Amino acid sequence: MKKLLCAILTLAMMFSLVACGGNNAANTGANAGADAGADTGSDAAVDTIKIGVLSPLTGNSAQLGNQVVEMFQLMADIINEEHPELSMTMAATAGIPSMGGAQIELVVADHKSDATTAVSEAKRLITEENVVAITGEFTSAQIKAVAVVTEQYGIPLLGSGSAVTLTDGTNDWEWFLRHGVTDQTYIKDTFDYMAYLNEEFDAGIKTIALISEDSEFGANIYPIEEKLAAEYGFEVVENIKYTSGVTNLTAEVMKVKKADPDALLMASGVVSDALLFFSTCKEQQYTPNYVLGQRGAFIQSDFLAAMGEDANYMCTSGSWAADIDKSTIKEMIDLWANSEYNSTGIALLDSHVKDVMLLQYLAMALDQAGTSEPEALREALLNPEYDMDGLLIEWAGIEFNEYGQNTKSNGVITQRVDGAYKTVYPGAGASIEPVYPIPEWDY
Amino acid sequence: MIFLQGLYEGIINGSILALIAMGIALVWGVMNILSFSQGEFLMLGMFISYYANKLLGLDPILAMPISAGIMFCVGILIYKTVIARALKGPILSQRLITFALSMVLVYTAQLCFGPEYKGLQNPVIFKGSINLGFVIIAKEKLVPFVLALIVAGLMFWFLRYTRMGKSIQATSMDRYAASLVGIDPDRAYTIAFGMASAVAGAAGCALTYYYYTFPNVGATYQLWGFIAVAMGGFGSITGAFLSGLIMGIADTLTGLYINTAIKYIGICVVFLVTISFRPKGIFGK
């Protein structure tokens, strides 16, 4: 009997090993498609180009990480196959045209939302898998860790972490490029939006409360918020920092409730924290007057799904919205909705698109360079000659400064209405009028 | 009013820590093993509650006996196949075996149930808040508190007044002496480990009322469970229960009156002071 039980438990353990290696299974799935395409490629010497995709496939951000990888798989297919009907850059032709139709091969690795793992996996991708560039889903802290490796080996690193310190000259990095905006821009958009609400819609926002997790993400955000609050004339009635991954946020909610600010600015990257905060608000019979999130949990599908209707009327800063009038956005929404890779059936969010666009951009640069040689690839990434209309994000353009920051990127503020984020700011691109304040929740 | 609310919330928050800690204390007290997998048993209890609600429409309180029963069996299975063998090995293996087990359980849960955060989908009995004027009582958070009281009472009664409970206590005092008087130590260990798993299973159900279920949820609570056990005195169920509540109060009041950023320092200061005066914990011997 004991032997039988042992055998059962051993099977369970093997089962969990399969789970640990699940990312690798996903990896081979992505590669299989690419390899199949590679067999029909015209240039045997460069039939595949390996791109490292580092993403949290396990751990606290696993849901987002897996979704991003699925989107990368879809984008790799778009690049590798002919799609003349699509207006997206790199879709019309199969593979990388200037490299004989070479196929993109994704090599997926799990960084488990852990900087140390991210470093070891980045090294493995470069030295064992021979990837020509690394991208994926990273926080700013993880980018800082991985950048040390990519600088050492001279490999381009593209990530959408938003900490100002990534591209303000603090780090002397040659190989990291950021296409998206920084926290400074996202937060300024948020304050511009509050001023706009006061001016155009007589919202009467005078007091604000800041709540930020104590990670690099939160620590980068609240000093900018404090500075801008003083500049814009908003009174900060509470400035709360909390430890991420908490068992309760009771004291935090009680403080916010007591201060009752006109707007609550929240920087929470961990979904369970944000969910716990708002469920505690409901327990305390408190509906915040207005919630302005700084991306993080606010653009993650499991937060939105778990919040349900209570997520309505919450706002977030971001780079992308589904209602932006752009053909590539409409195409991607449609492709994703019908994609075999979309295992969870979720709608596209800013958190996915800002990452997957980086693969599209890498393919563009490879085509421009005509080689995967690192220096040439970096040069093409820095000085794109492509028309930017075919990208998935609507930016004024791409022009990098000396620190690898795109100076032409811009953000939007969206508000969740009827279960979807809709653009409310800048006013010219708004698809709906903002709703202020949040209607009281049912307790 | 805000102090009363803070005090009440602290007790409520501490009750989940107390439930985790009581399971750890039982395993430590009887078997001298630090159960690193107690948080993962809580996680499994949460998944049982979640799926009972999703698939059968069961309220977590109704799923509680099912979860406790399943986790009792899981605990026995794990004891028989893993722990009992490790007990024959070096002391380090005994200590680390539950750590390895916790990793297995987390990744298996991720494979089977997915990594996303899951909230209850069907209506539950305990939902909403009662505003008494001087304190707001969230009905869903009353469940873990009442459960903690019941579990503490039941454990106390079981260990003190039942034959099996006395056998477990005797085994924890001296395994070899107990076997000399006809007690089967292996049976006592099996029941103790099963009971600890069952408590975590029931606690997991209570937690689903207001917390979200995901594979890594156990780690969030586990560390504080250990501190509660150390503060209460290793092996003391009563100590674990009281320490959990004290930690909850320290957490909430520090956040409320000093700074939320350092509220865990409040817990650690209480722990350090306790250990300074009572090195073996409040009820440690």
Image: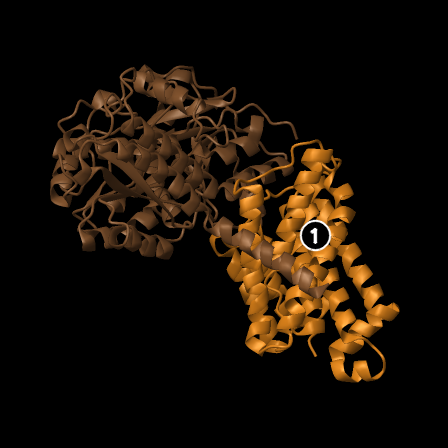
Chain colours: A brown, B orange
* Quadrant of the snapshot with the C terminus of chain A: top right
Residue B273 in the image: above or below residue A307: below
Rendered image quadrant of residue B251:
bottom right
Return the x and y of residue A60 as percentages of the image width and height. Answer: 48, 47
Closer to us: A64 or A438: A64
Rendered image quadrant of residue A29:
top left
Closer to us: A94 or A363: A94
Return the x and y of residue A188 as percentages of the image width and height. Answer: 31, 32
Q: Mark 1: give few (<14), some (14-19) or many (20+) Cα within 10 Å.
A: many
In this figure, which residue is indicated by the disc labeled 1?
Answer: B201
Return the x and y of residue B24 as percentages of the image width and height. Answer: 66, 64
Q: Residue at x 15, y 41 (%)?
A: A378
* Quadrant of the snapshot with the N terminus of chain A: bottom right
Return the x and y of residue A281 as percentages of the image width and height. Answer: 58, 37
Residue A307 in view in this figure: yes
Secondary structure, mark 1, is: helix
Closer to us: A371 or B120: A371
Q: Residue at x 42, y 41 (%)?
A: A26
Residue B180 is left or right of residue A183, and the answer is right
Residue A355 in view in this figure: no
Residue A69 is left or right of residue B135, and the answer is left
Chain letter belonging to callout 1: B
Q: Residue at x 39, y 22 (%)?
A: A335
Q: Amino acid at mark 1?
A: Gly
